[in-house]
């Protein structure tokens, strides 16, 4: 069985200029999505994210949301979506329980 990330890579190789995602007025091509996902995956890996880890994604529905997912999948990590609109205390509690190796989209409120 082919993995989801492998299928995305295959689609990018077939026609990289084709639109992968449209969100409002913004669009991103298949090759751009994979490149951005790769770059974020490299960053996450350099900062300790490994296969099997949890990556908390607190990004509003957007192209960046999908880039974060692609990055996590590339590493074999599990993306955990949470609402970026949650009150700070709830965000902190969820993040603590998840024991994520990375948190994407939550600014430090300290």
Image (cartoon, rainbow, N blue to C red):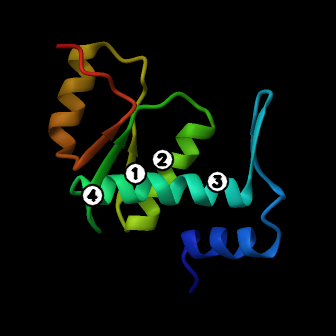
Q: Is residue 32 left or right of residue 38?
A: right
Which numbered disc, 4 or 2, marks the residue closer to the eye?
4
Question: Which residue lies under the disc numbered 1?
Answer: 79
**N-terminal-most mark, 2 or 1:** 2
User: Tag 1: Cα neighbours inside 10 Å, few (<14), some, or many (≥20)?
Assistant: many
User: Tag 3: Cα neighbours inside 10 Å, few (<14), some, or many (≥20)?
Assistant: many
**N-terminal-most mark, 4 or 2:** 4
Label count reads 4
Question: Which residue lies under the disc numbered 2?
Answer: 68
For residue 68, above or below residue 34: above
Discs 2, 1 touching: Cβ within 8 Å: yes
Q: Secondary structure at mark 3?
A: helix
Q: Quadrant of the C terminus?
A: top left
Discs 4, 1 touching: Cβ within 8 Å: no
Q: Quadrant of the N terminus?
A: bottom right
Q: Secondary structure at mark 2?
A: helix
Q: Is residue 40 left or right of residue 67?
A: left
**N-terminal-most mark, 2 or 3:** 3
How far is the residue under mark 4 from the one under mark 1? 17 Å
Discs 3, 1 touching: Cβ within 8 Å: no
User: Tag 4: Cα neighbours inside 10 Å, few (<14), some, or many (≥20)?
Assistant: few
Discs 4, 2 touching: Cβ within 8 Å: no
Question: Which residue lies under the disc numbered 4?
Answer: 46
Residue 85's quadrant in the figure? top left
């Amino acid at each position: 069985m082919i993995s989801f990330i492998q299928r995305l890579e295959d689609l990018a190789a077939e026609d990289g200029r084709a639109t992968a995602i449209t969100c409002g007025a913004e669009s991103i091509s298949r090759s751009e999505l994979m490149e951005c996902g790769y770059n974020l995956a490299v960053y996450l890996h350099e900062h300790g994210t490994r296969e099997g880890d949890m990556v908390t994604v607190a990004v509003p529905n957007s192209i960046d949301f999908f880039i974060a997912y692609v990055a996590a999948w590339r590493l074999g990590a599990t993306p955990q979506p949470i609402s970026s609109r949650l009150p700070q205390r709830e965000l902190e509690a969820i993040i603590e329980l998840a024991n994520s190796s990375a948190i994407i989209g939550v600014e430090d409120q300290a």
